[in-house]
């Protein structure tokens, strides 16, 4: 890619960017949210058609003109976006050949479809029936379906945008191993990731992008490649600590859960949470660790006004008094907030302005006698976005046009404006870069300094160890361990999970 410049109204997303990827290598592209990584890959894959940007693309020595994704795929350039493009109620085989069907005219050849699907599934190590519905497999396996789908298009250059963002450590390592196997077979890959340890583990070259421009490209064999050097290039400054310091200010128990049991909403008799007993004090960050499928999100959503589960039993206490949280409105009324892990699906209305998203959970605070006071909403929105440092052109800007880190901040503003005393943060930094993470951590510290009680779910062990005063360990729907900040180590946490499996 040579001299790529891409402009959107009011902003230059890419400014004279050049990128060279060698055949048969894994080339990582890193940068903060909004740096231009995904935009650059959208140019390469034909999402942004020729003529909508300046510069040129050369593939295998030949100049390319892509008017759409089919043009790039015909040459073997396939992109897998962070938001997986699979149809939940269709089978693996149907998804794999959707838009690339096997058969003639209006007659599909199902035998060939399933046979070919099974072959590609074998190549990526996916041991499921081709008839299995997408909704019945986990996120890690769905990612493998996307890769198998790419293989079915005779991929030569595979672009992966944050492929491990939603995966646990085990699934992430399996995926990285698969990329190395592809490399051994001669396939070329471009990897966008915020997980710098993974980047250093598998990439041959690492290109750092900041503010729409290439800062440098590192050779993982000859250059001194460290996480701190990459971070310095990404954020443009030294970061001496990943986690901002916090003064201890832990008070009395404010939020407590006793004997909490939740059953699956669809499968009768299947427990997803069993006899959970936890508490959070004022001014305290309490983490919940566990492998994917441990029941952490199910617990969080069930506590938030029973927005998940059925036949829920147990008690919730706030400030020493038992409360009945029958629905989300009850939870909000009792000053409880839930920051979902799925900001695009359940947290924000992407097609609405930032201003509207800010006040969704606290409309009564910007209304008079049930009528929205738009002037007050504008004032409140400007104040909260300024306080949290959201990078925006205007509060009328649609949330869909913000970077992941800024979307996450808008999601936090939505709940901060509801003036909660207890915040449940479910994967609060998923899919955002190290600089944006630091800003989220800073906001969390400000909240606990204001005596808020915070329950934080995270799949990133360093995040839990760096931010939490205490950590509960959860596995198969049960609490299997509890550690103070001083006691907690990744080894002890994993050991408590393994003991619970073997007991």
Image (cartoon, grey):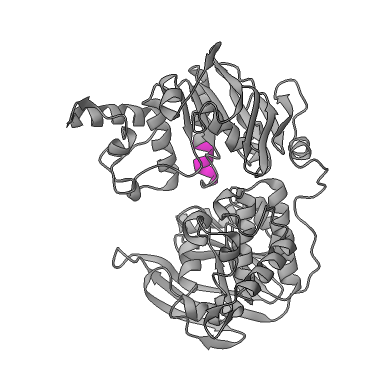
- Please say if 273 is above or below 57: below
The question of residue 470 being in magenta is answered with no
Q: Residue 414: horizontal and vertical position, in percent?
A: 60, 67
Residue 60 horizontal side relative to residue 466, left or right = left
Within the image, what quadrant is residue 424 found in? Answer: bottom right
- Please say if 123 is above or below 369: above
Q: Nearer the viewer, residue 481 or 94?
A: 94
Within the image, what quadrant is residue 382 found in? Answer: bottom right
Predominant SS of the magenta segment? helix
Q: Quadrant of the N terminus?
A: top right
Residue 486 seen in render: no
- Please say if 381 is above or below 226: below
Q: Residue furthest bottom?
A: 321
- Please say if 241 is above or below 480: above
Q: Nearer the viewer, residue 376 or 341?
A: 376
Q: Residue 322: horizontal and vertical position, in percent?
A: 53, 87
Q: Residue 218: horizontal and vertical position, in percent?
A: 72, 25
Q: Residue at x 25, y 40 (%)?
A: 131
Q: Residue 445: horizontal and vertical position, in percent?
A: 74, 65
Residue 479 seen in render: yes
The question of residue 173 being in magenta is answered with yes
Within the image, what quadrant is residue 189 found in? Answer: top right
What residue span does the magenta drawing correspond to?
169-174
Q: Residue at x 57, y 28 (%)?
A: 190
């Amino acid at each position: 890619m040579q001299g790529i410049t891409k402009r959107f109204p009011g902003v230059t997303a890419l400014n004279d960017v050049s990128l060279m990827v060698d055949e048969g290598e894994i080339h990582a592209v890193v940068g903060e949210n909004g740096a231009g990584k995904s935009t650059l890959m959208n140019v390469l894959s034909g999402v942004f058609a020729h003529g909508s940007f300046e510069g040129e693309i050369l593939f295998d020595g030949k100049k390319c003109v892509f008017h759409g994704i089919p043009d790039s795929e015909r040459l073997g350039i396939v992109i897998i976006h962070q938001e997986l493009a699979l149809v939940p109620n269709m089978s693996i085989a149907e998804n794999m050949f959707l838009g690339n069907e096997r058969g003639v005219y209006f007659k599909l050849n199902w035998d060939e479809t399933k046979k070919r699907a099974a072959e590609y599934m074998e190549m990526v190590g996916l041991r499921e029936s081709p008839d299995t519905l997408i909704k019945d497999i986990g996120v890690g396996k769905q990612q493998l379906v996307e890769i198998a789908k790419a293989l079915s298009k005779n991929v030569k250059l595979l672009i992966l945008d944050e492929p491990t963002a939603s995966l646990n450590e085990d699934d992430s390592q399996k995926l990285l191993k698969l990329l190395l196997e592809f490399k051994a077979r001669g396939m070329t890959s471009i990897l966008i990731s915020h997980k710098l340890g993974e980047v250093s583990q598998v990439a041959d070259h690492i290109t750092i992008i900041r503010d729409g421009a290439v800062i440098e490209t590192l050779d993982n064999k000859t250059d001194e490649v460290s996480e701190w050097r990459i971070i310095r290039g990404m954020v443009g400054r030294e970061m001496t600590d990943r986690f901002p310091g916090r003064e201890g200010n832990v008070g009395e128990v404010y939020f407590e859960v006793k004997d909490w049991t939740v059953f699956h909403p669809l499968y009768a008799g299947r427990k997803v949470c069993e006899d959970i007993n936890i508490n959070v004090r004022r001014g305290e960050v309490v983490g919940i660790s566990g492998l994917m499928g441990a029941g952490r999100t199910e617990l969080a959503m069930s506590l938030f006004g029973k927005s998940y589960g059925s036949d829920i039993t147990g008690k919730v206490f706030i400030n020493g008094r038992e409360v009945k949280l029958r629905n989300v409105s009850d939870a909000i009324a009792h000053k409880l907030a839930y920051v979902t892990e799925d900001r695009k699906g359940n947290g924000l209305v992407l097609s609405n302005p930032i201003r509207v998203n800010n006040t969704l959970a606290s409309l009564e605070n910007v209304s008079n006698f049930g009528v929205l006071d738009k002037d007050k909403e504008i004032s409140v929105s400007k104040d909260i976005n300024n306080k949290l440092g959201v990078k925006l052109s205007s509060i009328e800007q649609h949330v869909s046009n913000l970077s992941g880190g800024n979307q996450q901040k808008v999601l936090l503003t939505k709940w901060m404006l509801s003036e909660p005393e207890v915040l449940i943060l479910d994967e609060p930094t998923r899919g955002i870069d190290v600089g944006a993470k630091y800003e989220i951590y800073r906001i969390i510290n400000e909240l606990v300094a204001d005596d808020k009680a915070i329950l934080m779910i995270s799949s990133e062990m360093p995040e839990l160890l760096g931010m939490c005063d205490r950590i509960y360990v959860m596995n198969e729907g049960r609490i299997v361990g509890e550690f103070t900040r001083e006691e907690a180590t990744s080894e002890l946490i994993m050991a408590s999970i393994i003991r619970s499996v073997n007991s």
